[in-house]
Image (tube, rainbow, N blue to C red):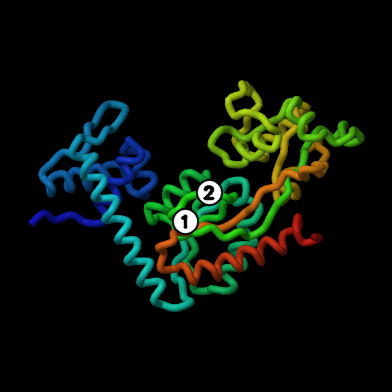
Amino acid sequence: MINFTLKQLRYFEAVARQAHFGRAAEICAISQPALSAQIAALETAIGHQLFERGARQVRLTTFGEQFGIRARSILREAEALADMARGAGGSALGRLRIGVIPTIAPYLLPSVIGHITAAHPEIDLLVRETMTHKLIEELGDGKLDCAIVALPVSEPSLTEVALFDEAMVLVRPADDAHRPVPDMDTLGQMKLLLLEEGHCFRDQALSFCALRNTLPREGLDGSSLSTLVQMVGAGIGVTLIPEMAVPVETRSAHVSIAPMGAPYPKRTVGMVWRKTSALSQQLEAIAALVREAAATHPAFAAR
């Protein structure tokens, strides 16, 4: 009989995704030698080599690619069993693995965590912050229970629940505060600073300004909203940021804030989870708590 463990399959999946033992070890929170030893033990147990180990990169063997398809299916089913067990406990979640995109996490998470832990003091809350496409991938793999993202995500396997709408506001140098607010056509002709590729907020801003994502934009991208606002303060250009980010990101920057006119750029923030999740009923309640948390946010409380 061939014997291997779910933990070994998870280690295999981490190495397969990262194509690197060191990065996979960091994600799995173990040492690289320990991870390598577990992969070697898995290969010995099944009698086949799973990876081609190069000096700088790790590649799946042909057998490893086929093995990976079955391994991911097993891991998803294992997570589904865990969800079923947690769902059978009624309203008690026990553990909640929630993902949040970077343009929401720093501004909404403190209130969200407070509301969830107040309603479920027994909960073990695990938070993952990364970009939308990675959150969707990890939801599909059963590594997350739900995620707070900008809607729509248009993924047929996921339930989408809208939580609230949020305006995008214009950030420009403080010296421009007296000038008329540009319309969308004018804004599209200005030096518009955006988040780097991969952020859904970048795509939304480009869409609102009727700009193509393929336009050359050397030196106009930042890795965070904080960087963009500071660049504006330095006189490099203008940017759009979500309403909830204003109190945090503009308090120490030499910038001015202006609401945009029609068509009033905005995004819809929502929560998503697998349609097949055994925790769907509990996640509906969590979504309601997130909506309550947003209503207490300084940017929205005065509405």
Q: Residue furthest left?
A: 1
Q: Is residue 94 above or below residue 63?
A: below
Badge 1 density bin: few <14, some 14–19, many ≥20, Cα 10 Å: some
**Residue of label 1:** 158
Task: Identify the residue at image location x=67%, y=40%.
Answer: 226
**Residue designated by label 2:** 153
Q: Which of the pair 207/141 is nearer the observer? A: 207
Q: Is residue 269 left or right of residue 64?
A: right
Q: Amino acid at mark 2?
A: Val
Q: Position of residue 139 (x, y in %)?
A: 43, 54
First reached walking from the N terminus: tag 1 or tag 2:
2
Q: In this rendering, would 282 be left or right of 219?
A: left
* Callout 1–callout 2 Cβ contact below 8 Å: yes
Residue 170 spot, x, y in % from top left: 77, 39
As drawn, 232 above or below 113: above
What's the amino acid at mark 1? Answer: Leu
| Outermost residue, bottom side | 90
- The Cα atoms of the two marked residues, 1 and 2, are separated by 9 Å
Snapshot quadrant of residue 52: top left
Locate the C terminus by quadrant: bottom right
Q: Position of residue 268 (x, y in %)?
A: 64, 52
